Amino acid sequence: MASSATLSRLATRTPLLRSGGRQTLLSQRGLAAANVGAARSFVSPAGARAAQFLAANKRVYRQTRGFTAVASKRVESQEAPNSQAYLNSGAIAGARDLVDVKKVLVIGSGGLAIGQAGEFDYSGSQALKALREAGVKSVLINPNIATIQTSHVLADEIYYLPVTPEYVTHVIERERPDGIFLSFGGQTALNLGVRMQKMGIFERYGVKVLGTSVRTLEVSEDRDLFAQALKEINIPIAESIAVSTIEDALDAAEKVGYPIIVRAAYALGGLGSGFANNPDELRDLSARSLTLSPQILVEKSLKGWKEAEYEVVRDSADNCITVCNMENFDPLGVHTGDSIVVSPSQTFSDEEYHMLRSASIKIVRHLGVVGECNVQYALQPDGLDYRVIEVNARLSRSSALASKATGYPLAYTAAKIGLGHTLPELPNAVTKTTTANFEPSLDYIVTKMPRWDLSKFQNVKRDIGSSMKSVGEVMGIGRTFEESFQKACRMVDPQFLGFQGVAFEDLDDALANPTDRRWLAVGQAMFHEGYSVDRIHELTKIDKWFLHKLQNIVDTTHELEAIGSLFGLKQELLLKAKKQGFSDRQIAKAVGSSEEEVRARRKGFGIKPWVKKIDTLAAEFPADTNYLYTTYNASSHDVTFDDHGILVLGSGVYRIGSSVEFDWCAVNATLSLNKMGKKTVMINYNPETYSTDFDVADKLYFEELSYERVMDIYELESAQGVVVSVGGQLPQNIALKLQEVGKAKVLGTDPKDIDRAEDRHKFSQILDDIGVDQPAWKELTSVKEAEDFADSVGYPVLVRPSYVLSGAAMTVIHNRADLEEKLTAASDVSPDHPVVITQYIEGAQEIDVDAVGHNGNLLVHAVSEHIENAGVHSGDASLVLPPHTLDQTTLDRCKVIAQKVAKAWNITGPFNMQVIKAAGADGAEPALKVIECNLRASRSFPFSSKVLGTNFIDVATRALVGRDVPEPVDLMAVKRDYLAIKVPQFSWTRLAGADPFLGVEMSSTGEMACFGKDVIEAYWAAMQSTMNFRLPQPGEGLLFGGDVNRPELAAIVKALAPLEFKLFAANSTVGGHLEKEAGASVEVIDFPKTDKRALREVFAKYDIRGVFNLARARASSLVDEDYVMRRNAVDFGVPLFMEPKTALLFAQCMAAKLPLQEGIPPEVRRWSEFIGGKPL
């Protein structure tokens, strides 16, 4: 039996990257447990006895870390661990104290928003999976129709309803669950739980909160309680004072001392937080923050310190381990969601690592977390001082990253713990050879890099700070920092070749003040401006270790450039470059060659990537995992390649225009292939997704979706084919090259046909040939031609480049002067592709058609209509399915168009069309014009599939493989007694300065959909499911503004008249118009345009709880009254209606639904009740 001395001696060894000999490795592995209840993960019978002894003497051993000693002689005789033998050995006493629940309610996170995105689809899905395994019925409330968790594959019953106390209570009344999970739905679920507990609802209906208690959640969220709790165990936190008024905030700042940071309590992703250097900045900042949260914290800023995170798991028997630690590349001051992050930490000393690890365990035990928890620290760069920044007692963005980085399934384990399991009795689901009670050790390094889409918004501030702005993230895996960092750079955006620079007007400013392009500023300084590591460190406070590593990349680049030709490139240098994560394209650029030539030379030298497993055991024990990455820093493969599977290309990083809906498509394609008995290989690099979970595909490559890497994997696997039509635009862009250059077999529609749809000329020509109408258009090379064309068709016109997803760089132009200005900008966007000008039809209705073809025949199709007029990007539009205003003739004509298109492009697989319905001339039938056609799955595929009860991707996958292809069926001919409406989720609140106005550029980050018997019922629920939506109540104030020529403005006021709202207008034109047209009494109020504080007082004084602003065009200046009204409605958390059609529809909903009736509203029905069963 190991003495305490041995225990404590072993405990000081670090479970970091591996170090030397066998003995040490095993002792590190001994760190498996942070508590006595846990035996070592590969217990021998003697070990099992030791574990029982330790368990029996729990009190005595409370402070030491329990695991068995490692004797060298025992190592020799011990067989390779085998999970079955281990479980049979009796080391695990089986589940004893399981929580007695039969039906559990799982709260989802709603629409994807900045700060709360796809990671909660992943964690919620894991929880549902755990419930299903345990034989417990699950009921899910989540209005997000695009996610994988909202399908009957995972949840027993699903409600597409707003995640609000009212609706959740109705579901509890109907379903009578005996348990509820609150920690898998992000901040939305957590805040809901705290509110419902205060309202006494859980107690009234006898619903147990599983996992971490609501009290613990409150302590971790309420800053005062949190500070108090950590003081009790002497853990230092950033000194902060909680206040609820602006005056108190100013007083607090005097006590703490500037510079300070303000945080809002109960907010996600740093919402409502920021830095202030003086009282004026603080006044504006606190005014904004207090509208988002009742309580804000004023605390001393520790900008420039290092930032670290630890993921901790604890069960109800007090077993506690740290699964993963991460270090931010950016120093403190940048929100962790906007930071580049590496795991495991690279620059901490052993002492620092253990100091923070011990503190994490102490905190989690003290707070009483049951499940998963994340602790964030600030660490002094040159000493041992640290502060706890915050604790998230729920699954977070970081926990999705940690699960993928270590291969330890945190969400799944947390769900099992919530059901009463303890860590030592849970096998690790990934490795299958150890229990969940051990700390992973990694023999690789991961780099997470965020993706921003700030350039899509006008007036938006590009600085990044304590409030998160990124829309997605990637994770690069490698065996050196350089390798994983360069992979991540390319994953964020294929236009980057790796670590590189971009010219800045003021480089020093770009280095000192972080923006979304900071790593490019570091690249510019190193590559082109000759800055030293010391100078960059002074400006950025980024640790020198990271900067020296980046300098290695710069040095190798210069070495390649010095050679200057492909034939001067020797094997040694080429291998060195590949080990540092250089891509073939990057090397080609440096030596003045092409990607194909470099690839050929590299293969000639026999330089190929090696495939390694992520096995959480640093390869010390055999691990059975299919979770893979490629690296050049190795000398052998960890897997065999005899599956010859089908490659499915995922959607890559989430960004505006390509998000979780494509992950739904990729996962469903994989599941369908598996059902047909095909082996599958998923390639994707997004840690937030369900597709990168270890048990979706037969093999998962956490890798780049570049031509080079896909071909590497295709060749290694000798794959049967590759699916490019389910991952959005990224796979589409390399499809032609895969087939023509790489000679890969692309399944489905021929990439040459894809190209004929993407190329405007070919596309338009074919539409003319098959007799399908389209708006007039012309391709241009000079401004003069453009002006002549625009004059001939009449303004407005639409200017756009070819090859584009989500309307990037599309603009509506209203006059000649704008046209000239825009063309100079548009030519920068795509030098390789010319610009196209299209006639823009105002006031037309837009229709979306999702369909699947097989050898040119139409198999299934769905026709949805937009509520908004054409001109609002389809990703920002509200879709109604089945459509409620389109007549049968129009539906039939849409079907005929779909049939013609399928035939003309010989489509096999999914496709999507956008059609405009414009009034016909002189009473003729309306014109149907096709404005776009994508020969891939679209973002509305999950919506169409789930509303119509037919899995479009399953049909498409069978078409791709040519097996069990179903007969064509007309789903639109079926009469349904329900409809669903999909609405966009915007993240305006996060994007300071951006104008909340809809146009041809997509700006929403997510979507929700709700069902109902009619448009009123469905839209009423859908609007309330948008994030932090507060319904205006009769008697409160509504503010009106915008263009008085819009007839909807008066119609809205008429609709709301019976509800006795108080009506206000910002100017007499609007006020007078509404009084005259709607016969309502409207008070014109003073509306300060430049003083945010005064404006906030106006909103408070008149109790303004809703804003209707129907402007004609986007604001041209920041003092435009309509812009100020829209922007501040968003900043003050007041519902904003800025699009005429939907604003009027919601006014009609309010007129029909308010005041609320007693009892359960009719829209509270299971999804399976609406669609009649569980066909998906």
Image: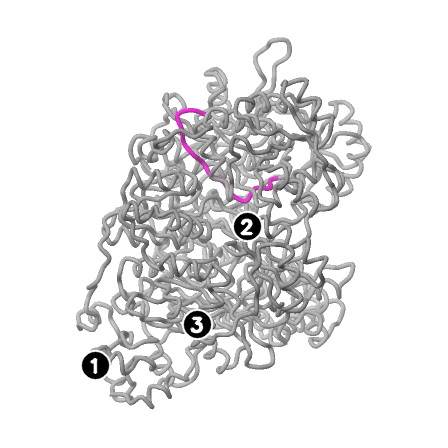
* Numbered tag placed on residue 53 in the rendering: 1
Disc 3 to disc 2: CB gap under 8 Å? no
Q: Is residue 837 above or below residue 453?
A: above
Q: In 3D space, how far apart are the residues under numbered discs 3 and 2 (Cα atoms)?
A: 27 Å
Type of amino acid under label 3: Ser
**Residue at which label 3 appears:** 360
Give the structural element (helix, strand or loop) at label 3.
Answer: helix
Measured as percent of width and height from the top left, residue 1162 is found at: 36, 29
Q: Is residue 705 visible?
A: yes
Which one is in front, 75 or 508?
A: 508
Give the structural element (helix, strand or loop) at label 1.
Answer: helix
Type of amino acid under label 1: Phe
Measured as percent of width and height from the top left, residue 75 is found at: 27, 84
Q: In 3D space, how far apart are the residues under numbered discs 2 and 1 (Cα atoms)?
A: 50 Å
Q: Decide which of tag 3 and tag 2 comes sooner along the chain.
A: 2
Task: Name the image quarter holding the C terminus.
Answer: top left
Q: In 3D space, how far apart are the residues under numbered discs 3 and 1 (Cα atoms)?
A: 27 Å
Residue extent of the magenta highlight? 1002-1015
Q: Is residue 954 above or below residue 899?
A: below
Q: In the image, is residue 1011 part of the stretch drawn in magenta? A: yes
Measured as percent of width and height from the top left, residue 694 is found at: 37, 58
Q: Quadrant of residue 564?
A: bottom right
Q: Is residue 1084 left or right of residue 859?
A: right
